[in-house]
Image (cartoon, grey):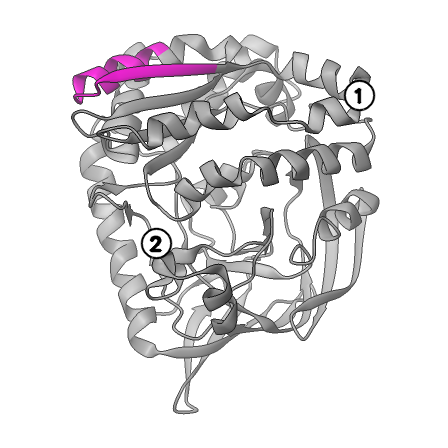
Amino acid sequence: MNRELLQKYADFIVQVGVNVQPGQAFLIRCPVDMAFFAHCCARAGYAAGARDVVVRYEDEQLARIRMELGEESALSTVLPYELRSWLDYAESEGGCALLAIHASDPEAFAGLDAGKLNRVSLARRKALKPWNDYTLNDRVQWCVAAVPAPAWARTVFPGLPVDEAVEKLWSLIFDVCRVTGGDPVGEWQAHVARTTARRDQLNAWGLRSLHLTSANGTDLTVGLAEGHVWEGASSTAENGARFIANVPTEEVFTCPHRLRVDGVVKGTKPYVYNGQLIEGFSVTFKDGRVVAHSAEKNDELLGELLASDEGACRIGEVALVPASSPINQSGVLFYNTLFDENAACHIAFGAGYPGTIAGGTAMTKEQREALGMNDSAIHEDVMVGAPDMDITGLRADGTTVQIFKHGEWAF
């Protein structure tokens, strides 16, 4: 790999994506076999003024062994120290910022008990909710970025020797993350400005609903929550620091009304859930709730996802991404939601983001639900955008506006 671009990528992620502030603790989650990249990010964190850098390594192979052989009750248990180990940093003077480095094997848990996987995942999410709320509510700066571990690269480029596959995936990540040109900060400033302009126009229109159609059978009406706000590209943490939650990001997104989604939507890219692939899915909504579903691969797993809790069969996010997105134009299926969701319009089963309702981060869950926001322990993005997708918006005065035409922004 190009070491110069590698450090530029790390510097950009830490200084612009996370935007570590002087005096903060900088927390990094990283796969154990990608420790060298955590080292690059640690250097960038200290350069940005972090008072401490704490790296927590994760071992996917060990996680599979535990999931296969461990008792469900033990796997589902989160001891108090584990939650406190995150909250202690968040509640300390100066607070903290978080970087999650992804390098997952898309089918790390293939062949294991889907029900057990889902129950364990759900139990842990519920137990860690006080910490997860810090990111969901943008109380801290947080960023998710990816690096190409061998198992992931082998899935993306199955015909290549693993070393070549890793190198090719590095090159592709540098390209779609606007690092290859050598000025990622300048490129991202321009990208954020363009995305912000579209976000502001969507907010100015005062939309009541969206209508999504494509030739594959998608015909979906998505009502929008009362007081919904369109977001995109960058966010603002509680301390006023701007950050980019996902690197890369191409989306502008908002909050659907949990009771006002109707019609059929077709999946257009495989989706990785709990280390297993769901492919070729179709979902039918009535009054906001999924009433029918099917999938060409792992339909049972899709059913487990939708039954996770009461809100899992409704959606908490609708996001618009043009077909001209660099990720989509690469022609590569990444088998990684961080990238694939930025190649196509998508919806998310489960919880909405409080920041997509005006004043939502200061509201109670009940107040947000009264305005239409969905609540759930899960938030799972699934890709539904197609190159021929048209999207129109219904305004409060009854007029319509063209938002997407043939997969591209119409304004």
The answer for how far apart the CA atoms under marks 1 and 2 are is: 41 Å
Label 1 Cα neighbours within 10 Å, binned few <14 / some 14-19 / many ≥20: few
Q: x, y (%) of residue 37? A: 39, 13
Q: Residue at x 44, y 75 (%)?
A: 226
Q: Quadrant of the N terminus?
A: top left
- Give the residue at mark 2: 232
The local secondary structure at tag 1 comes to: loop
Name the residue type under label 2.
Answer: Gly
From this view, report whether residue 184 is shown above or below residue 391: above
- Provide the residue span drawn in magenta: 39-56
Identify which residue, 155 or 349, lies in the foreground: 349
Identify which residue, 408 or 379, lies in the foreground: 379
- Disc on res. 71: 1
Name the residue type under label 1.
Answer: Glu
Q: Quadrant of the C terminus?
A: bottom left
Residue 91 can be seen, yes or no: yes
The local secondary structure at tag 2 comes to: strand
55 in the magenta segment: yes
Q: Is residue 251 left or right of residue 196?
A: right
From this view, report whether residue 289 is shown above or below residue 12: below
Q: x, y (%) of residue 289? A: 69, 67
Q: x, y (%) of residue 277? A: 71, 36
Q: Is residue 267 left or right of residue 336?
A: right
Label 2 Cα neighbours within 10 Å, binned few <14 / some 14-19 / many ≥20: many
Q: Residue at x 18, y 22 (%)?
A: 48
Q: Residue at x 39, y 65 (%)?
A: 357
State how many labels appear. 2
Mark 1 or mark 2: which is in front? 1
